[in-house]
Amino acid sequence: MRHVQRPPVPQQQSQGYEDGYHSPYDSGYNTGQVYGAPAGGPGAGGGNRFPGGGGPAGPPPPAGPPKPAPDWRRRIKIGSLVLVGTLLVVSVGTYFWADGQVRREVDLSKVIERPKDDDCTTYLIVGSDSRKGMSAEDKKRLRTGSAEGKRTDSMMILADCSGGTTMISLPRDSDVEIPSFKGSQSGKVFPAQGRRVKLNAAYAEDGPELLVRTVEHNTHLRIDHYAEIGFAGFANVVDAIGGVELDIPKAFKDKKSGADFAAGKQTLDGEQALAFVRTRYAFAEADLARTKNQQKFLAALASQTATPGTILNPFTLYPVLGAGLDTLIVDKDMSLWDMSQMFFAMKGVTGGDGKSMNMPVAGSNGGNLVWDKAKVAQIVGQIQNDEKVTVSGN
């Protein structure tokens, strides 16, 4: 494009513009600036004077405001609130689901003439030989037999006191008196007849309520809560947590229970665990040796289950709860919180001020084990006074 030179502007016309009028022609051509380009900018002076001729025709568009830096503190706060809300919803849902699985079938209000209450929380923990829910193959694999009904295979008092936790096994062959009691079904009161029987006969005669009444009458300890689990539930819980590690000091075998253990540390699955806690004929002390093994195993089970890895992991927690809760029978006033406290009290038996023992025995009467009355009274007094138990059992 050719550059066209305009003729000079007459002096007085130019003066007229100086007096207040600005000519649009002077803004570019008189200075040599390309039309449309600002003075001093690209294309000014001897630069590129040709719009579209290879250089920018004008200034770049103005830049927008700078983007603000991410507010990580706000994002973390929101993320934390979402996480807490999710955990709260899951926890509440888990609570109501678990609470609905529990079988609250034992009515302690039917127990009469109860001992005085104390500051300790005392549980009666019962292992029954109930085969409910077990298939024929399960009964064969676990060597439980097929007897109808259920009997108490183990009984323990767990006293959770500020002075320490004490677990006391009650041999099922213990010599006890059946006191007066109210029938759990009939509501009829049966007077005391001075009958002395094995402790497990009380359960067989009128179920958990009479068992609690008999234990309270013969120990003078008040039972605050009752918990019972059968064969199937016990084995399933052990399998759900992946087995329980136990140190067995001496090898033993028992054809009836299926036990066949070498000495040393080993992990027991549900089948092996059930055999371990049921074995009695492999030991000279029979029932007393078995109750010691039961205490040892339950303490190990609680210690390995009541951990953050189990409680905070839903993939472990849900199978454990599902395996145990629907076979667990408790009293009507026992909440999930009470159950958790019982479990942690069992865990405390293995550490700190915890103590496990058999009920002290002074002799036998026709095959029944007779308790040492003086030692029993001392144990009861220490528990009722919320003190550490210092008495040793058999």
Image (cartoon, rainbow, N blue to C red):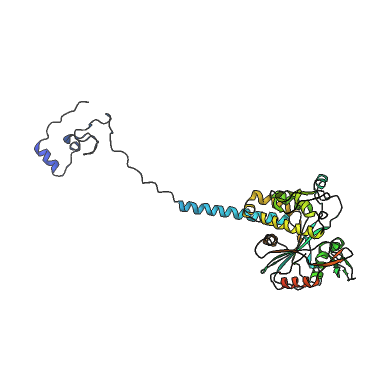
Dividing the image into 4 quarters, which one contains the C terminus?
bottom right
Q: In this picture, is 313 found above or below 60?
A: below
Nearer to the camera, 276 or 88: 276
Percent coordinates x, y for residue 273 in the rendering:
75, 51
Residue 182 visible in the shown view: no
Percent coordinates x, y for residue 269 in the rendering:
73, 48
Percent coordinates x, y for residue 230 in the rendering:
79, 54
Q: How many marks?
A: 0
* Image-quadrant location for residue 392: bottom right
Q: Residue at x 24, y 30 (%)?
A: 50
Percent coordinates x, y for residue 212 in the rendering:
80, 65
- Left or right of residue 73, residue 203 in this image: right
Q: In this picture, is 354 found above or below 63?
A: below
Nearer to the camera, 55 or 23: 55
Q: In this picture, is 148 found above or below 7?
A: below
Q: In this picture, is 180 found above or below 281?
A: below
Residue 27 visible in the shown view: yes
Nearer to the camera, 84 or 114: 114
Nearer to the camera, 341 or 64: 341
Looking at this view, name the residue that lies furthest to the top: 1
Dividing the image into 4 quarters, which one contains the N terminus?
top left
* Image-quadrant location for residue 204: bottom right
